Image (cartoon, grey):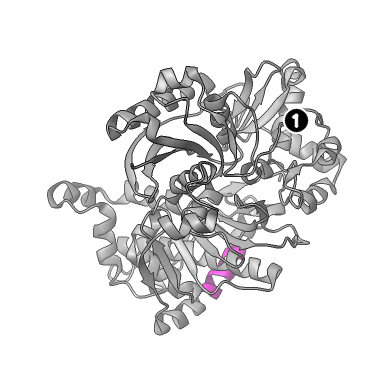
């Protein structure tokens, strides 16, 4: 009898319910875009709408089961993954009293105040948690304390978004380490809440629920959810994890020295380790992996996927028109032409994301620089290729930074996410990094990672390595091309130097930073 595993994947802009069989093949899925509500009273506020978004998730589960035509009693377990940093606050009755998405940035004043009153606190917290104030929950919860004191006083628990979905399925509030650690309120080594960091930050120390490792059974689907979705009350609800960590599991990145690049709207470089060594300069993020007693160094590149989408929508009207008649996507058309542009894009440099500097995180104004008024060498396709190369340069900088901290370097890279669908981008990454690159069959690996967690909870798989041996497969390999590699060494060094000049211009107020962390 064939059995199934379900994953709920809640991203920044959309959410999906996906059903897999136990061999890792997708059987059916449903998805929906969702938006987060701006609050005009508070600049940067981006609320997460609990009621509307729960209804979306319930409907997607129901649709996926109907599409699949499977008996819901054959769905052994369900697990969840989500955008990280999105947090939910609850009262003593389990009622949600406040929630924000990961892109919420209302807490500038709280960060500035922490810098002024406790200038060493951020680094102290980083050395315990691997997090800074840039993305963590500390400033956001302080914002609730300062601006909504009555709500703050009612708070009984805090959880992350994937834990909230788990709660709605099982009626049990909990947190798992891979996303919970991104609050900045976790002790990385212990993989548990760090109440001392909460105390130092001026936060309550009694609002932190039980911690369950990813792949651990939380409970069963409740009768209420079963009636609304078509799930069975016999289906297990299993702890999932943060999207990047579960994406790594879905690509087989679970053992010491394994490394991956997840190429989406943001690009994340993930390096897996069995030992924690904090960076004295607090330049990179350190997270709990979703695999017990395993951690990851993470370095993030801002917006490579979004920059490519912007370029497509702003400059590729002709290709959009041709897409309708030829069936070839804009990206396919542009890539075929970009193959003819030499490595280094004739010297054209794009400056978008910089190498990560977590404790002083900012990016120069986006720009293209050092091109000539020559339409043969510098045209739309040249700019297109330079966007690809900028993402690879940033990734190389991030890998070199992690190598410096760990005194190790990965022998190869697994490349997943939407960008890995492009053979040219894969080859550019291999050439710039001077490393072999492997591409998994399942490009959107995050949901597969959640399904693996569900399967471990249901004892379909003995452990993560057993699951990976059964469900993760690779379809393409790319090796560095020697003549390209030497060209890219030269252009990478040029990019680094130009970027620092561009960043100085933004720091001096002549241009606007593409992104700058709260409080800087």
Secondary structure beneath label 1: helix
Q: Where residue 227 sits in the image (x, y, percent)?
A: 42, 17
| 103 in relation to 231, above or below | below
Is residue 185 rendered to the left or right of residue 474? right
Residue visible at 60% across and 52% down? 291
Q: Main secondary structure of the magenta part?
A: helix
Front position in the image: 272 or 48: 272
Seen in the picture, residue 329 relative to 436 is either above or below; the reply is: above
Q: Position of residue 510 (x, y in %)?
A: 60, 52
Residue at 41% across, 76% down? 479
Q: Is residue 437 above or below residue 230?
A: below
Position of 484 with respect to 215 (left or right) is: left
Q: Quadrant of residue 519?
A: top right
Is residue 475 toward the left or the right of residue 200 in the image? left
Quadrant location of residue 67?
A: top left
Residue 16 seen anywhere in this rendered image of the structure = no
Q: Is residue 54 magenta?
A: no
State the residue at coordinates (36%, 60%). Answer: 384
Q: Position of residue 358 (x, y in %)?
A: 68, 54
Q: Position of residue 126 (x, y in %)?
A: 76, 51
Nearer to me, 277 or 426: 277
Residue drawn at x 14%, y 52% is 326
Q: Extreme left residue here?
A: 325
In this view, the residue in front, 84 or 105, is 84
Q: Which residue is mark 1?
A: 142
Range drawn in magenta? 492-501
């Amino acid at each position: 009898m064939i059995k199934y595993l379900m994953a709920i994947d809640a991203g920044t802009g959309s959410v999906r319910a996906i059903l897999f069989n136990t061999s890792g093949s997708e059987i059916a899925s449903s998805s929906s875009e969702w938006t987060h509500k701006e609050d005009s009273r508070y600049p940067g506020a981006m609320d997460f709408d609990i009621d509307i978004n729960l209804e979306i998730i319930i409907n997607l589960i129901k649709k996926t089961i109907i599409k699949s035509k499977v008996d819901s009693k054959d769905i052994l377990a369900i697990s969840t993954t989500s955008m990280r940093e999105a947090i939910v606050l609850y009262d003593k009755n389990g009622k949600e009293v406040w929630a924000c998405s990961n892109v919420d940035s209302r807490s500038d004043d709280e960060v500035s105040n922490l810098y002024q009153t406790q200038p060493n606190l951020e680094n102290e917290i980083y050395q315990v948690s691997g997090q800074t104030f840039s993305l963590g929950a500390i400033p956001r919860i302080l914002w609730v304390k300062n601006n909504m004191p009555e709500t703050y006083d009612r708070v009984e628990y805090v959880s992350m978004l994937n834990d909230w979905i788990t709660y709605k399925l099982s009626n049990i509030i909990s947190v798992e380490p891979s996303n919970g650690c991104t609050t900045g309120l976790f002790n990385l080594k212990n993989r548990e809440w760090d109440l001392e960091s909460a105390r130092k930050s001026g936060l309550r120390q009694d609002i932190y629920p039980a911690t369950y490792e990813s792949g651990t059974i939380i409970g069963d689907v409740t009768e209420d959810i079963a009636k609304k979705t078509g799930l069975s009350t016999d289906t297990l609800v299993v702890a999932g994890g943060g999207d990047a960590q579960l994406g790594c599991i879905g690509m087989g990145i679970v053992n010491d020295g394994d490394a991956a690049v997840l190429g989406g709207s943001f690009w994340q470089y993930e390096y897996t380790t069995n030992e924690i060594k904090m960076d004295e300069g607090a330049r990179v993020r350190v997270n709990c992996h979703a695999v017990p007693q395993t951690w990851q160094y993470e370095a993030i590149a801002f917006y490579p996927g979004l920059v490519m989408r912007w370029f497509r929508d702003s400059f590729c009207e002709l290709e959009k028109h041709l897409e309708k008649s030829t069936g070839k996507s804009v990206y396919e058309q542009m890539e075929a032409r970009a193959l003819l542009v030499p490595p280094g894009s004739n010297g054209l440099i794009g400056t978008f994301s910089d190498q990560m500097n977590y404790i002083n995180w900012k990016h120069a104004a986006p720009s293209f620089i050092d091109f000539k008024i020559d339409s043969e060498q510098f045209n739309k396709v040249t700019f297109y290729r330079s966007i690809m190369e900028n993402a690879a340069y940033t990734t190389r900088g991030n890998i070199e930074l992690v190598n410096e901290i760990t005194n190790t370097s990965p022998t190869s890279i697994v490349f997943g996410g939407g960008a890995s669908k492009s053979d040219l981008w894969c080859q550019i990454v291999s050439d710039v990094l001077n490393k072999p690159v492997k591409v998994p069959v399942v490009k959107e690996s995050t949901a597969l990672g959640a399904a693996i967690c569900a399967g471990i909870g249901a004892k379909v798989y003995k452990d993560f390595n057993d699951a990976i041996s059964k469900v993760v497969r690779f379809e393409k390999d790319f090796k560095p091309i020697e003549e390209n590699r030497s060209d890219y060494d030269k252009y990478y060094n040029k990019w680094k130097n130009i970027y620092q000049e561009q960043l100085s211009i933004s720091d001096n107020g002549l241009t606007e930073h593409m992104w700058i962390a709260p409080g800087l």
